[in-house]
Amino acid sequence: MTMPKARFTKSQAKGPAYYAQPRFLKSPASRDWWTVLHPPYTLWHLSYVVIGACLVGPVNAARLGATLVAFFLAVGVGAHALDELHGRPLATSIPARQLIGAALIGLSLAVGLGVLGMFKVSPYLAIFIGVGIIIAIGYNLEMFGGRLHTDAMFALSWGAFPLLTAYFAEHGRLSGPSILAALFAALLSQAQRQLSSPARELRRKTGSVEGFVTHLDGTNAIIDTDSMLRPLEQALRSLCWAVVVLAAALAALRFHLW
């Protein structure tokens, strides 16, 4: 039986993420910032905010909007800027001072919105603000010896936490169903982590892949970086849009959009 020659695929040419450095943006700076913002994942975790707020009605649109903006500033901007500052995993050329400035502005404005919510909703919102600051800084800068930078902490921080915070910000309390919904978000975020970790390993740390699979019918298929990345990133895309669609469905239900 003649075996196909295995190919060596240089993963460095693929970029640090499937959404990195998009061609529709012309300037290198805008491409770098797009990459740092992690648009698909930011949209994914903002969807948890919508799901949390819309679990039960009625829903106050202003509160939901403020919570969405706060999480975009804290996670999409602040936390992701700190993550890039710590070790440059995305290999952008954004100056450190700009990343620090983005983190400070994003987190400060998010905290400001949270403090406003303390007066509008409940002073206990301060607990969520404090936890959010610890997560954003401690997780992304890998403080405390990296104890906060774990798979379990990711699931709780980027899945359960935004959903519970949004529920509390909207309704001023927590409930049994909100805890179960937070568990759903944590488990889904755990799945995200289980898919994205090997994908990052292939894109950022793997020099080459060589091999083949022999099927039961005797045919062979080459294994390379593309064949290993494809199912991981297709699953990530599908999960991202699934969460977005669920959030849109709940919002449409609560606001009687049709």
Image (tube, rainbow, N blue to C red):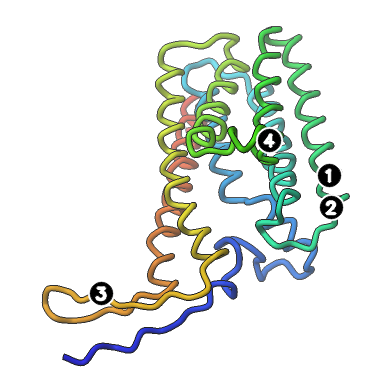
Q: Is residue 144 above or below residue 128?
A: below
Q: Are the two marked residues, 1 and 2, in contact with CB atoms closer than 8 angstroms?
A: yes
Is disc 4 placed on a helix, strand or loop? loop
Q: Residue furthest left?
A: 217
What residue is drawn where x is 63% and y is 17%? 169
What residue is disc 3 on? 213
Type of amino acid at the residue the image marks with label 3: Val
Precedes in sequence: disc 2 or disc 3? 2
- Say the numbered circle drawn on residue 223: none
Task: Report the quarter where the N terminus lies.
Answer: bottom left
| Coordinates of residue 18 in the picture (x, y in percent) | 55, 63
Q: Secondary structure at mark 1?
A: helix
Query: Residue tagged by mark 1?
Result: 100
Circle 3: element type: strand
Q: Which residue is mark 4?
A: 143
Lower position in the chain sequence, tag 4 or tag 2: 2
Q: Spot the residue most to the front.
A: 145
- Find the distance from the CA under tag 1 to the CA under tag 2: 6 Å
Residue 67 in picture, x, y percent from top left: 66, 27
Where on the picture, by quarter, is residue 105?
top right
State the separation of the CA atoms marked 2 and 3: 44 Å
Q: In percent of the image, x 41 and y 16: which residue is there? A: 177
Q: Which residue is mark 2?
A: 96
